[in-house]
Amino acid sequence: MNGLNRRDFIKRSAHLAALAVLAPTVPGKASAANTSLPDGLAWYKAPCRFCGTGCGVIVGVLDGRVVAVQGDPDNTVNKGLLCAKGYHAGMALYGKDRLTHPMIRRNGKLKRVSWDEAIDHIADRIMEDPKRFSIYGSGQWTIGEGYICQKFMKAGLGNNHIDPNARLCMASAAVGLVTTFGVDEPSGCYDDLDECDTVITWGNNWAEMHPVLFSRFMDRKHARAKSSPDQLTYIDMGTRRTRSTLAADHYLEFVPQTDLAIANCICYQLLAEDTYDKAFVADHVRFKGNDGSEMTLEDYRAFLAPYSPEKVAALSGVSEEQLRLLGGIFGDPHRKVVSLWCMGMNQHTRGTWINNLVYNVHLLSGKIGKAGSTPFSLTGQPSACGTCREVGTFAHGLPGGRLVAKAEHRAECEALWNVRPGTLNPKPGYHTMKMFQALNSGELTGMWVQVTNPGQTIPNLNQNVNQLRDRFLVVSDVYPTVTTEMADVVLPAALWVEKHGVVGNSERKTQQWFRMVNPPGEARDDVWQVLAVARRMYERGFEGMRDKDGNFLLAIRDEKGREIKAWKWKVFNKTFNVDRALFEEYRPFTIKKHKDVAPYDELVRTHGLRWPVVQDSRGVWRETKRRFVEGEDPYVEEGKAVQFYGAAAGDDRAIIWARPYEAPPEVPDDEYPLWLCTGRVLEHWHTATMTGRIKPLHDAMPRAYVELHPEDAEAHGLNEGDLVRITSRRGSIVLPLWLQGRSLPQRGLIFVPFFDETKLINMVTLDAYCPMSKEPDFKKCAVRVESVT
Amino acid sequence: MNGIIRLVAVLLLVSCGARAGEDATESAPAPGQVAAPATSAVETVPPEQVEADRAHRAGLRAFYTAPPVIPHDTEGLRNQDCQGCHENNSPEPSDQTPLGTPHFQRTNCLQCHLASEPWTGGTVTPVASDWVGLEQPNEGRRAHEAAPPTIPHRVRMRENCSLCHGPESLYESLQTPHPERTSCQQCHLPDAASRFEITRGDLEK
Ligand code: SF4
């Protein structure tokens, strides 16, 4: 190293970086030696604000401000570890451009107004056209936030046009679970990563997207490699090499969309080799054709005929040998296998099918309902499960796994909400894609957006959000975003530990936190915002905001049943925990489908509990690690071992669906010769409205880029750093080329992250969606690239 | 002679610490205690150096409990490459390199340690933030003159003391004056003030 010794080199480069990297911590105090932490510093527990992993953090608060975050060692999810986003989560509160007062657009400009004015204005506009108003929410809604919006819309406006951004994220996972098991959400849990011997990722870069879970398995795998001849195996299946691939024992690179065929190929081998789990299949499984007709095992075998390893190798680009490796692993009765997936399978025009197909593989091989063997659908957002799936904030849903289309379900909700029978509308509202299209056409006239940023995330933006500016758009958010730019009313919201909250992660774990600091300026909780608008409508005599006794529909009551004036900010903010009241109001809904969440006070006491949480004979609230498994899940009857009690037919059997391979709707051709795949990066959460304001995260990953295979780059005459125009049939953007990047796409595929609000890749993406889950495919469309430098 | 006195002092303190647990720092000096405190490197290194070392360490973190950023070029680096220089397969203090990681059992380095310069090259627009982070406590406390200082920082994921305090430490001001001793926590206890007890975060009242 040119005469510099290694230490000096490191030290010097470190010094240079230090100057460039981070602001001093406490200005002016750096020189004084301090021997202990400051008086008044307190640490509080919370779940991380960002991804669906749901790590526990401990937040350090001093003088009314968040000053530090560390991993919670007592949380079973992460056992003290976090990822870079989680560690720096507290910094998300302090971007200089926080929204701190309500604004209404007048003559094209957003002007500061009082809360009263803003609430009046929103109430007026909704009352003008309540049936054509909509709410677009989020998997980042807390349970209380989702619940109150659900009640406001479905009971208050009698209108089902409420859908969350989770539609873009895990709708296929939910519909996959419901169609296979009759009930939503995974049966396994993260502990299975500690007990399995093999992990297979289906198009999932968990090293970046669920890093704490990746570490949980990888640290174990590395330790095992040093201490035992029994090695753990990690197999990555994907369309590009990622950080996860680097840690894999085997990498199976497939042509986009052929995951459908690969899953069927595994089942083909299990039957052809006679290695399927006969007892499990006999006891717990039924077969159904793609049209829902009953099938025998022999019919199913015939259905699988086109999926031999020879044929699937030709289609998928995965070698026969690798396909047989998968077949062998699932056919080995001693192997304990966890399959993991997230957006790769969910954001798929056959997202529901591919979810069903991976369940087929695990059901046929009996690798489910056992410690260390499970299919496990990872969630993207911190409460996509807790709020969207459990509270049912979808256009077709009601709380606790109920459906608006079912009279019995509506009646139960009407009773719990104390509204007149017939109040709830039996017709499902518009799902996300239809909702935006209906806003464009004018069929819907208004929308309230909370905790998300559709102006950046809806696919094919040019087509799908171009009229949003002309509709009545209310946006509650914490920073200016692409969406607030289009809004008529902007409401400043409280963020994360500035409010009370409860969320639910991927493994059915519900976690609670208390407000630790006050929101800045006049920012207020989303829950309060909805309450205040509803109350205003009630005061003006809007019938829907009355229950059947004439009382305020969204009345918040204390334990003695007395109504609290929670629509008054002072009361809401200072004297009463509305979040607790809402959670306890919601809790009875969760029992019907055996999704019993824990009482609020149990959540306060613990570091999260996995549902169903049921009291044992001694009165202790017990969580359930594995659903459907005797001895773990209290709802499984004695002697059943495994009982898929959600089954719609009431026979306790899960369904193996004969889902075929189907070509994607848009494939590369001469004009648009490349596949485009979009996704996230470790540093950023969602559209980076929070992480982009966190210096260490932003500095590491300040802008979006495009990755190409080096041979494709060469073929197009492109070099590192060149500006590249990416064009699809729908739109085009320019991005710098990153060849030495962290992923290596397969030939013929390019990758672009979607976090950058200055580089809207969703101008280019395709809005085709899974016909069952209505989830769009952000992973595959046809584009061309050209140099603009 | 000096060594013997020190040894006596250590033994006395150990027995004292064993009785008082983590609150040893607050207990009175053992009766008859005569030893002078061990000279720490901090006292022999020029104050400017101590200050520069401190500022340097603080500069790598956004706040006390944040993982430090990577202070060198990361172009093309992957997790596997980190271990080339930072690997440290042994928890034994004698077996360290100055660049070892204090948590060798963790393997996904880039999960927590961020690049300090953009992975993608080019200039970075500055972030406008009002963030003020918690400062790291710099020095341990001594219950009395002869007592060994407490550990002023978190120990979790930094169980391997010699990485930062051994003779090979990057920071001269952190080096122990008695590298021959290897059971650090026998005498240096985590500071009571550095424990992280969760308060019931209830601002209702
Ligand atoms: S972003 Fe996800 S993995 Fe990272 S700390 Fe938060 S919850 Fe954990």
Image (cartoon, helix red, strand yellow):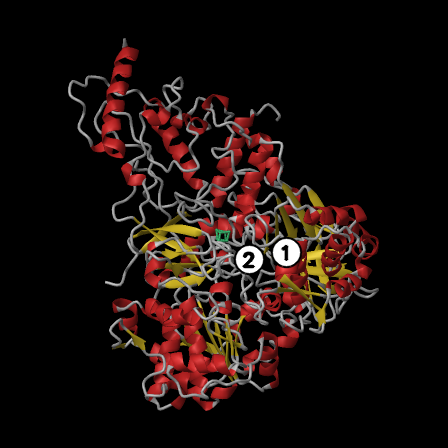
Question: Along the horizontal axis of the image, is A726 left or right of A702?
Answer: right
Q: Residues within 10 Å of mark 2 (few under 14, many from 20)?
A: many
Provide residue A771's location: percent of width, then percent of height: 67, 73
Q: Secondary structure at mark 2?
A: loop
Amino acid type at circle 2 is Val
Which chain contains the residue that carries disc 1? A
Of all residues, the one furthest to the top in this rendering is: B1
Residue A280 numbered mark, or none: 1
Whether residue A150 is situated above or below residue A190 in the rendered picture: below
Q: Is residue B16 above or below residue A727?
A: above
What kind of residue is marked 1? Phe
Query: Residue B160 lies in what quarter of the image?
Result: top left
| Residue A150 visible, this angle | yes
What element does badge 1 sit on? Answer: helix
The x and y percentages for residue A601 are 32, 60
**Left or right: A224, with A730 as reference point:** left
Q: Residue at x 26, y 27 (%)?
A: B18
Q: Residue drawn 57% across and 80% down?
A: A430
Query: Which of the two discs, 2 and 1, labels the residue nearer the N terminus?
Result: 1
Front-most of B81 and A548? A548
- The reply to whether callout 2 and callout 1 are in contact (CB within 8 Å) is yes
Say few, some or many: other residues with alpha carbon within 10 Å of mark 1 (under 14 / 14 to 19 / 20 or more).
Answer: some
* Above or below, A33 relative to A413: above
- The residue drawn where x is 64% and y is 42% is A233
Depth check: A100 or B35 in front?
B35
Q: Residue furthest front?
A: A639
Q: Quadrant of the C terminus of chain A?
A: bottom right
Pointer 2: what residue? A642
